[in-house]
Amino acid sequence: MKAIMVLFDSLNRRFLPPYGSEGIHAPNFARLARRTVVFDTAYAGSMPCMPARRELHTGRYNFLHRSWGPLEPFDDSVPEMLSASGVYTHLTTDHQHYWEDGGATFHNRYNTYEFFRGQEGDAWKGHVDDPEDVESPRRMRHGLWRQDLINRQYLQNEADHPQTLVFDAGLEFIETNKNASKDWFLQIECFDPHEPFFSYEDYRKHYSPLDEPAPVFDWPDYKRTTEAPDEVERARAEYSALLTMCDRSLGRVLDAMDANGMWDDTMLIVCTDHGFLLGEHGWWGKNVQPWYDENIHTPLFVWDPRAGVAGERRDELVQTVDLGPTVLDFFGLEPTARMQGRSIAGLIRDGEPVRESGLFGAFGGHVNVTDGRYVYMRSSVTEANAPLFEHTLMPTHMASRFSPAELEDAELVPPLSFTQGVPVLRMPGLPFGSPYAFGTLLFDLHTDPEQQHPIIDDALEMRMIRLLVDALRAADAPPSQYERLGLPLEGEPTADHLLGAAQQHLYAQSRLPLPAADDFSSDFPGVNSMLSKLLATPATRDVLTARLGGAAAFLGANVPGATVLDLAAFTPSLTGERLLALDSELRAAVL
């Protein structure tokens, strides 16, 4: 028996023909749909990239306890379990986050692995001098833009692109081991179509917004959409072109399965970690805004040779946590008691439901639940968005270790239910942004698939609160999460726990346009002043810290050349009303 997982990053289901997209050249995704079961109600869980991969390994949600981080010493790992049982596992990837501090324990869970360099400003080629045109259209993470410009000099031929090399290596593994005497599992993991949306003329030619020369805009910041409509359409076309390149790579895998007669004994899973906002809801990217449908409702295609079901669709709810147990089931292995996911083999075979609800979110953001039709996004009950704690024995962020200052208040607490008797460090955590800026939201995806009209319905909200509380308890959420969300740790929720109506004004405020620079004075200090200068002045630094908390220092380190008004596009809590108040406070601070 063999299994292949093709894992794309940031694959938006609404851009795929099997999910109703028009104008996208993706014939191999259409071909894939004819050979597999297509899931219409698949949801991601823990966000973003590495939290999602931790779910794939462990079969359990992790965003309630932990932000971005590596596999913990007490974590289960599906690839490691397969290897221990005699199933050979191999990973081929260009996902550079595996080699950063916050992902460094994942790839060694496979028997063997291959890594290809050059994606998203990967610290690959060393050029001391800046490249030409280093001026970035991005405000955040300018250093990644500089490095990406250097890397692209080595990727001018499609054959050298890391996506191409990832699939080359995966196909080599298939060819080498197609007649192996042992079972095997192959994970072909492609960083694309994650930004930057860098592709080639063979793929760009399908999209008319790319016909005319224009400044490069293939890597939007995670922020409000403030660009002109033609710029937005160009970025969407850049994404579409890269998706078409992914489609071509997918077709190579399908060709190999056809040529080698693998459909009789080989499982195929094609999936993603999450989607990507390309101007929908007035936002780019992910993380700082709510996890809207475009980002969290994911494409999923599965061929299980035991069932032999192809060209059919399943509407029942499934999640990322279910994929690991499904692979274990295929090889005759049981999930551990700590895994919360369930095999979807029965659902593929005869429509047997897997779950009543799905839980999803990012550390410190909204905590969300869906039943497949309604989506309930629970905000923090107060603007403080507290308490919030990290629980870990691996104190690393995406690309750095926790600082000594972050660890000053760490305490060793008793084992959690899933840590196999091991105590963990608990310390205050810092989210990307505050869900309070958007408030608590409830949407009906049947009547409002674009999620433009939040529902205020106390009875429906109470039903979703009960689903959420049940999911939190099943996930062993820490007590701090119940306090942060204003939900009962024990007992039944009551009318006192309703939050939608009380917070509906927050969502309305979040959708208002931001004021322009001309609406404020250019004199120092004020919101038109450079953030770096404001942070260097004790009185104004205190005002910013009071308003933005730890985000002030983070933004100062990452976008020092920006004004406070510039930052409002990145910071949901800086509404027009807040900017006016902040401008007054900054001026008063130096009087």
Image: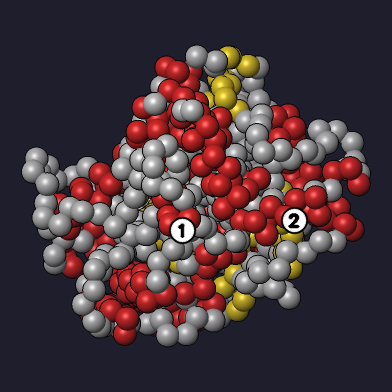
Residue identified by numbered label 1 = 516
| Gap in angstroms between the C-alphas marked 1 and 2 | 25 Å
Front residue (pair 166, 25): 25
Residue 318 vertical placement versus 496 (above, below)? below
Residue 374 vertical placement versus 105 (above, below)? below
Residue shown at the point (36%, 40%) measured from the top left:
530
Name the N-terminal-most of marks 1 and 2. 2
Residue shown at the point (30%, 65%) measured from the top left:
217
Mark drawn on residue 322: none
Count neighbours of disc 2 (C-alpha within 10 A) and say few if under 14, some if 14 to 19, many if 20 or more: some
Q: With 215 as the anchor, is 287 left or right in this view?
A: right
Residue 319 rendering spot, x and y as whole percentages: 61, 56
- Can you see residue 195? yes
Residue identified by numbered label 2 = 504
Amino acid type, residue under disc 2 in the picture? Gln
Q: With 497 as the anchor, is 244 left or right in this view?
A: left
**In front: mark 1 or mark 2?**
1
Q: With 579 as the anchor, is 234 left or right in this view?
A: left
Residue 191 vertical placement versus 123 (above, below)? below
Residue 303 rendering spot, x and y as whole percentages: 52, 69
